[in-house]
Image: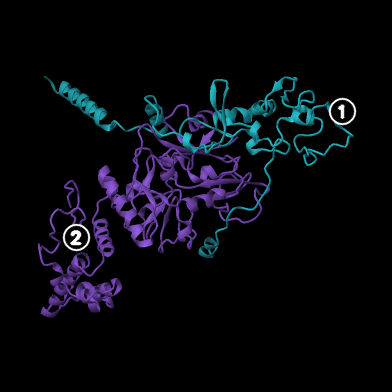
């Protein structure tokens, strides 16, 4: 590609910006489809064929056999060679073939670029914009719908903080609904970032006795309600344990995940003392008409199977000055959100004038989520 | 140089080296987040984002109470039958027992008890277009929070600071907050019970 500042290798398969009509296979003229297999395979057929050719019977063998019982005779060596050739030829044929339509080529090009892009954390602003544009285009090619996706960076002089009034929360759970809707969470597994714990009066904060999935008229007599979600710790243990640095703390204090860099090991889930992280055990599904089209790369864009996700204080909203969806939805005003660095902000007033506490303060995680009472 | 001086020198150098390296103060490192907030907000210069575009055509007025000023929604244009004097052209006594259309029949006061409150605790029978304080001073309908704050002083303090009530728009300045009567019906201010917005059936299955 023309951009030389990239930190990863890109194959020029079907660049729309190309100056010469050289294509990936190196043939300047005559079209390269002559070298590639003429017949078109469907994506699934192609995948199956490639997998069969490359691992063949190893599909059915267990791990021990795969490692210790390797027959690398001439036959299997040829097999493996053919497989890699087939994969390469397939990619080239899809993107260079004159039979394949432009959209398929573009899809292949986008997939390639997305596959080999770097960690979002290390990207320059141009690279961030490029990946966001690719994701928007890819979504358009696949669904025909146009979304808007932002890659807005943290703003200077901003550190987000949150306060939760446990005497005001009535347990209505409007926040949970708003959050699921805003953040495109998987509907089939009913994933939710927020949990509202119904606690008995006079028992202190005993989470083991609390109920976070009640269904009766609220507020219930003799109970109070306390919500938990990701606390965006200033010293986040989840970030420490990530083996691939797919999660980090942004300058405005948001702890975010690059869904495309996450390998799904769930170390962070185990490291979080607050149950703030969620894992996609299956492919997240959101009905097309319910998808929130206002997205951010680090926020509510569509996730895939096998990656972590969590509350981002609605990065797509908060970075443009709005309150997170839970704050906006709360009918009791129990949720206060704001900029901790602004001495005149309401969150600062709460911290300075109310009796505030945080959960598991002794761990030194420094959550930026305070609780207070009237 | 005797052994004694060498030993002392050694100790002094070790202590110095330890004190320099033990407390690793990087530029961006604070002992806790409160310390960080205090230090960083000293150089606060403001932000580029603004809440203004999220006010959605809500008519706002600026109020200033004890040095805090912020926006609250205009109230008068939200009251269905304002100005009151459009009907209340006569004193109340003259309007009773006439064939006039019944108004306000659905209002029942569920707010404090009869010894503490009745209609005229807040409404001014002499001038229906204004509310009245406990000492019979005029209070504008747009400043009705001044009426509530006569008794609910703690809530008023919290509301001014931002610990009570709800913000309009977003966290970014300018600050706009709902006023008392936007959430609480002044004639029946308590929040009722209702069913939660959702129930997670998947959680039930998973926890079996």
**Res. B189 image quadrant:** top right
> Which color was chain A given?
purple
Q: How many marks?
A: 2
State the residue position of label 2.
A13
Q: Position of residue B183 (x, y in %)?
A: 63, 38
Which residue is under mark 1?
B93
Q: Quadrant of the C terminus of chain A?
A: top right
Query: Where A329 sits versus A134, above or below?
Result: above
Circle 1 packing at 10 Å, graded few (<14), some (14-19), many (20+), is: few
* Left or right for B187, reference A39: right
* Residue A77 seen in the current view: yes
- Which chain is in cyan here? B
Does residue A355 sit above or below A281 in this rendering? above
State the residue in front, A150 or B18: A150
Q: In the image, is B203 to the left or to the right of A268?
A: right
Mark sitting on residue A50: none
């Amino acid at each position: 590609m023309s951009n030389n500042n990239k930190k990863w290798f890109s194959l020029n398969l079907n660049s729309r910006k190309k100056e010469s009509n050289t294509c990936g296979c190196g043939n300047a003229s005559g079209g390269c489809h002559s070298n590639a297999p003429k017949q078109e395979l469907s994506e699934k057929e192609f995948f199956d064929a490639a997998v069969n050719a490359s691992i063949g019977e190893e599909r059915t063998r267990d791990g021990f056999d795969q490692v210790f019982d390797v027959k690398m005779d001439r036959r299997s060596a040829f097999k493996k060679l053919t497989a890699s050739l087939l994969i390469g030829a397939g990619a080239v044929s899809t993107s260079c073939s004159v039979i394949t339509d432009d959209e398929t080529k573009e899809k292949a090009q986008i997939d390639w670029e997305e596959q080999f892009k770097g960690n979002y954390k290390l990207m320059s602003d141009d690279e961030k914009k490029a990946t966001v544009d690719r994701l928007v285009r890819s979504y358009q090619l696949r669904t025909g719908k146009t979304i808007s996706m932002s890659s807005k960076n943290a703003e200077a002089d901003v550190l987000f903080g949150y306060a939760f009034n446990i005497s005001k929360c009535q347990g209505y759970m409007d926040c949970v609904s708003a959050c699921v809707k805003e953040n495109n969470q998987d509907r089939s597994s009913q994933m939710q970032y927020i949990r509202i714990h119904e606690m008995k009066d006079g028992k202190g904060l005993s989470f083991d006795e609390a109920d976070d999935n009640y269904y009766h008229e609220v507020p219930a007599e003799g109970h109070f309600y306390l919500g938990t979600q990701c606390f965006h710790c200033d010293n986040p243990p989840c970030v420490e344990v990530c083996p691939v640095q797919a999660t980090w703390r942004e300058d405005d204090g948001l702890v975010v995940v690059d869904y495309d860099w996450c390998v799904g090991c769930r170390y962070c889930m185990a490291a979080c003392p607050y149950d703030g992280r969620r894992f996609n055990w299956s492919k997240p599904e959101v009905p097309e008409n319910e998808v929130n089209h206002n997205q951010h790369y680090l926020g509510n864009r569509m996730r895939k199977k096998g990656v972590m996700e969590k509350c981002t204080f609605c990065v797509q909203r908060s970075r443009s000055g709005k309150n997170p969806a839970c704050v906006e939805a709360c009918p009791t005003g129990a949720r206060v959100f704001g900029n901790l660095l602004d001495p005149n902000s309401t969150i600062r007033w709460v911290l300075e004038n109310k009796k505030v506490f945080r959960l598991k303060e002794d761990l030194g995680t420094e959550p930026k989520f305070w609780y207070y009472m009237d | 140089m005797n052994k004694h001086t060498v030993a002392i020198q050694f100790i002094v150098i070790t202590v110095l080296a330890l004190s320099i390296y033990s407390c690793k103060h990087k530029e961006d490192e604070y002992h806790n987040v409160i310390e960080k907030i205090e230090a960083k907000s000293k150089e606060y210069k403001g932000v580029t984002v603004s809440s203004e575009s999220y006010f959605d055509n809500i008519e706002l007025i600026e109020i200033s109470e004890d040095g805090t000023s912020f926006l609250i929604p205009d109230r008068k244009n939200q009251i269905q039958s304002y100005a009151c004097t459009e009907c209340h052209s006569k004193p109340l006594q003259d309007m009773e027992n006439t064939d006039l259309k019944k108004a306000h029949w659905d209002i029942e006061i569920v707010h404090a008890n009869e010894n503490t409150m009745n209609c005229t605790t807040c409404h001014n029978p002499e001038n229906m277009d204004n509310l009245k304080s406990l000492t019979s001073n005029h209070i504008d309908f747009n400043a009705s929070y001044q009426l509530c704050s006569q008794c609910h002083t703690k809530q008023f303090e919290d509301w001014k600071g931002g610990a009570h009530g709800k913000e309009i728009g977003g966290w970014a300045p300018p600050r706009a907050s709902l006023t008392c009567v936007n959430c609480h019906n002044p004639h029946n201010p308590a929040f009722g019970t209702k069913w939660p917005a959702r129930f997670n059936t998947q959680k039930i299955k998973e926890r079996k």
